[in-house]
Image: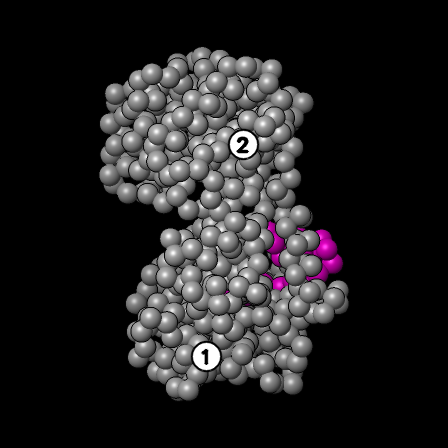
């Protein structure tokens, strides 16, 4: 089976969020299942030079963008045994940053059309073309309109993954013919609520649409979660699937992670976590207390991540509970300022670190006893998976990927603590439940070992995607 994985970013070449991690891991995991998976993405200016130096030029071609044609260069590189194609056009991609430009609709329309145009030139005929998020949503649309009846593409099927439905690629209808090149009579494919909606177009035209967790797929039928597209999801429900994102268990491995202070496995985690806690306390000027429960959090400081309900209860927690709380992240000024105030007021209990600091994030996971993920929405969250891997027991709200990976330990079988209602009181009560569990140390160690042995690997997810691809191909492998 041959798969072309289409993405606007992929590690290690370009990274801005979770999509890059998925695109960097899933193709590799599919390769372990003997699937020939190649990746295609834009050749951004910001790709590190040492990675650009490994690329070789393959071919140039002319790509239609509505009524005009644009130059497209195709470069190739190999990373971890995976072939990557890079679409080059300096006018569109020689810029600072990946997204947020005034002409993003045209930039990614070009990219989507170039992906399909290049395939005969590179002599790679995929059985499956798998596109991701609004930036590549036009791939299944263009395939449906212009390529599906082309003999060269015979048998090719399309899969589209929604990682976060909040970002839909909405534009004015005047772009339909002038920029997107979609015929007037076909504009209904991308028209929704009086405007262009690229995500809607992908849902309409892809053979299968996946989301980043089973629960998230169900949630998208609800207007509260779907940002207006619930009617489209319900209408196309027969083609919707939910497959969890996985975790790169080689990169996130407490036994080999050199970014932590001390490495440990499920047979040495008691000492390992104690050593990590002590060193993190020293670094952050917290009192060196071996037995105090440490609550960790690594998150964007924005409302969808639960910062509003955390703010509602944080001071009460710090006043009355014997804890240490460490948070790392950045985001909205109002939350950052609030955390600065709490740090000044409760210096022996609370530390806020601002920015994106990967090595400190790993140290927080390794040192924490409890890890907080109180998100309002969690389409494909992996923070709780990392926490489980490092033996930091997660407290999560029952939504999206959080619901699919964390179950409440009250039954003696779960791997964390879960609350349902999105409010501060529910969150605080759940934190107190976790602190009560921590006080019973023998039972807590059993819970930690259970958490560390959870299987959230990409190997497991790749099997699900492979089965999905085979289903589209009528059972062929």
Where's the N terminus, which quadrant?
bottom right
Q: Write down the residue under mark 1.
A: 71
Query: What is the span of residues highlighted in magenta in the rendered image?
Result: 25-42
Residue 262 within the segment the image draws in magenta:
no
Q: Secondary structure at mark 1?
A: strand
- Residue sitting nearer the eye, 147 or 201: 201
Where's the C terminus, which quadrant?
bottom right
Using the image, determine if residue 120 lies above or below residue 36. below
Residue 363 is situated, as x and y percent measured from the top left of the image, at 49, 29
- Work out how far the residue at label 1 is from the one at label 2, CA to CA, in angstroms: 55 Å
Residue 352 is situated, as x and y percent measured from the top left of the image, at 34, 29
Q: Nearer the viewer, mark 1 or mark 2?
A: 2
Asked whether disc 1 touches disc 2, contact meaning CB atoms under 8 Å apart, the reply is: no
Q: Label 1: few (<14), some or many (≥20) within 10 Å?
A: some
User: In the drawing, does residue 15 fall left or right of residue 77?
Assistant: left
Please report whichever mark, 1 or 2, sits nearer to the chain's N-terminal start.
1
Residue 374 is situated, as x and y percent measured from the top left of the image, at 41, 37
Q: Secondary structure at mark 2?
A: loop
Q: Residue at x 55, y 43 (%)?
A: 404
User: In the drawing, does residue 442 fall left or right of residue 431?
Assistant: right
Q: Residue at x 49, y 75 (%)?
A: 141
Question: How many numbered marks are there?
Answer: 2
Residue 27 within the segment the image draws in magenta:
yes
Give the quadrant of residue 296.
top left
Using the image, determine if residue 134 lies above or below residue 338. below
Numbered mark located on residue 15 in the image: none
Numbered mark located on residue 408 in the image: 2
Using the image, determine if residue 6 lies above or below residue 458. below
Q: Residue at x 32, y 77 (%)?
A: 173
């Amino acid at each position: 089976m041959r798969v072309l994985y289409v993405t606007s970013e992929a590690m290690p070449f370009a990274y801005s969020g979770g999509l890059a991690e998925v695109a960097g891991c899933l193709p590799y995991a599919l390769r372990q299942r003997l699937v020939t998976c190649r990746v295609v993405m834009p050749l951004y200016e910001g790709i590190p030079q040492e990675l650009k130096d490994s690329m070789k030029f393959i071919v140039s071609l002319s790509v239609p963008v509505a009524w005009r044609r644009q130059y497209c260069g195709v470069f190739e590189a190999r990373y971890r045994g995976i072939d990557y194609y890079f679409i080059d056009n300096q006018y569109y991609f020689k810029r600072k940053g990946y997204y947020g430009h005034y002409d993003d609709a045209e930039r990614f329309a070009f990219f989507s059309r170039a992906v399909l145009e290049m395939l005969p030139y590179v002599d790679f005929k995929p059985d499956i073309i798998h596109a991701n998020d609004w930036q590549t949503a036009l791939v299944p649309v263009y395939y449906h309109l212009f390529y599906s009846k082309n003999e060269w593409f015979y048998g090719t099927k399309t899969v589209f993954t929604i990682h976060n439905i909040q970002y839909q690629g909405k534009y004015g209808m005047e772009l339909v013919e002038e920029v997107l090149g979609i015929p007037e009579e076909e504009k209904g494919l991308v028209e929704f609520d009086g405007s262009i909606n690229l995500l809607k177009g992908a849902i309409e035209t892809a053979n299968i649409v996946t989301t980043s967790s089973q629960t998230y797929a169900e949630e998208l039928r609800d207007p509260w979660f779907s940002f207006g597209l619930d009617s489209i999801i319900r209408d196309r429900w027969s083609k919707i699937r939910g497959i969890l994102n996985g975790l790169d268990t080689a990169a996130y491995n407490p036994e080999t992670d050199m970014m932590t202070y001390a490495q440990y496995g499920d047979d040495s985690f008691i000492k390992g976590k104690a050593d990590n806690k002590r060193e993190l306390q020293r670094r952050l000027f917290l009192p060196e207390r071996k037995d105090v429960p440490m609550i960790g959090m690594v998150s964007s400081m924005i409302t969808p991540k639960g910062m509003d309900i955390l703010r509602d209860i944080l001071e009460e927690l710090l006043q009355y509970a014997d804890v240490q709380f460490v948070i790392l992240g950045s985001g909205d000024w109002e939350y950052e300022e609030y955390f600065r105030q709490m740090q000044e007021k409760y210096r022996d209990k609370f530390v806020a670190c601002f920015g994106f600091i990967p090595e400190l994030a790993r140290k927080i996971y390794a040192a924490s006893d409890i890890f907080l993920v109180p998100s309002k929405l969690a389409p494909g969250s992996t923070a709780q998976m990392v926490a489980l891997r490092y033996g930091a027991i997660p407290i999560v709200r029952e939504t999206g990927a959080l619901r699919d990976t964390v179950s409440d330990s009250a039954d003696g079988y779960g791997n964390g603590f879960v609350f349902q209602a999105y409010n501060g009181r529910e969150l605080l009560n759940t934190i107190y439940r976790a602190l009560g569990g921590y006080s019973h140390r023998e039972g807590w160690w059993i819970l930690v070992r259970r958490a560390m042995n959870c299987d959230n690997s990409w190997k497991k997810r790749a099997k699900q995607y492979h089965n999905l691809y085979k289903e589209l191909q009528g059972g062929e492998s």
